[in-house]
Amino acid sequence: MSAQSPLKLLCVTAHPDDECFGFGGALMLAAERGVETSVICFTDGQAATNRGSAASGAELGKMRRHEFGASCKILDVTHHELLDYQDAQLEFANFSDTAAKLVERIRRYCPDVVLTFGMDGAMNTHADHTMVSAFTTAAFHWAASPKRFPALGPVHTARRLYYNTTNFFFPGRPAPLPTPWTVTLDVSRVQHRKFEAFRAHTSQLPLMEKFQSFFETRAGIEVYALAATPTPQPAEQTTDLFAGL
């Protein structure tokens, strides 16, 4: 990896705080090795149960946009962008139009690796997470196809698509149907910063407090499933999202 051409990682999420809770360790480890990291978040989280001091949805959205930026700074994210989709309504978005927005960004950012949720909806089986997985998966493939959205820039073939998955379930919550992982990341060295990034989401601190002891015993590991590559290959267990790139 040369200084002139760093590897690039794109992470696509649904709500502010997804970037740290689900992907924080991967983002920080990538940044440490000189990878250019970008995060795209679809909504500003106005439908959240925890609302901090916000008196309205718009006020909560503004608060959570600021929290998202603060968290991305802690995670050493190179670029972050928060789109204007409505929280808890992504399943009703026009699929082609929405995926096209990601196609344009993939072609513009030219990531080597793309991270997003699996189709299970992640740990809280949220429909927004499932839809982000679907949009991102389609965009990963369509960005590489000259037949899809030719007006959105030169085709770009990213080299790996990974789904964030899990090796545990939340107690007392409906269990997802997770994708078996192929990558196990030891993020224990940056775990304290992962918590720091979550605490930047001050409106969501009641959630952190509720599950903190549970997080602390399990947050040193993140697991991902290799979902797509440009070349046929067998699935293998690794400890590095960028192995061989």
Image (spheres, rainbow, N blue to C red):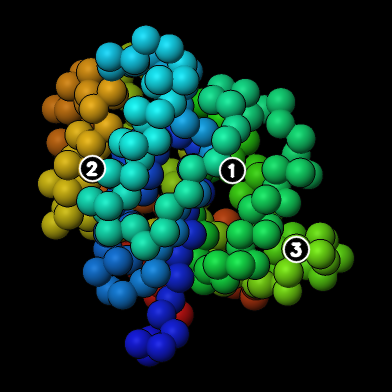
Q: Label 1 is placed on what type of residue?
A: Ser
- The residue that label 2 is drawn on is 197
The secondary structure type at the circle numbered 2 is: helix
Residue 16 position (above or below residue 59): below
* Residue at (61% x, 67% y) in the render: 108
Cα distance, mark 3 to mark 1? Answer: 21 Å
Answer with mark 3 or mark 2, whichever residue precedes in sequence. Answer: 3
Spot occupied by residue 167 in the image (x, y as percentages of width and height) = 35, 41
In the orientation shown, which residue stands out farthest toward the right? 147
- The residue that label 1 is drawn on is 133
- The residue that label 3 is drawn on is 152
* Residue at (73% x, 51% y) in the render: 100
* Comparing labels 3 and 2, the label whose residue is closer to the camera: 3
Q: Quadrant of the C terminus?
A: bottom left
Spot occupied by residue 90 in the image (x, y as percentages of width and height) = 63, 29
Cα distance, mark 1 to mark 2? Answer: 23 Å
* Residue at (58% x, 26% y) in the render: 86
Residues at marks 3 and 2 touching, judged by CB atoms closer than 8 Å: no
Q: Label 3 is placed on what type of residue?
A: Leu
Answer with mark 3 or mark 1, whichever residue precedes in sequence. Answer: 1
Is 11 left, or right, of 101 in this rendering?
A: left
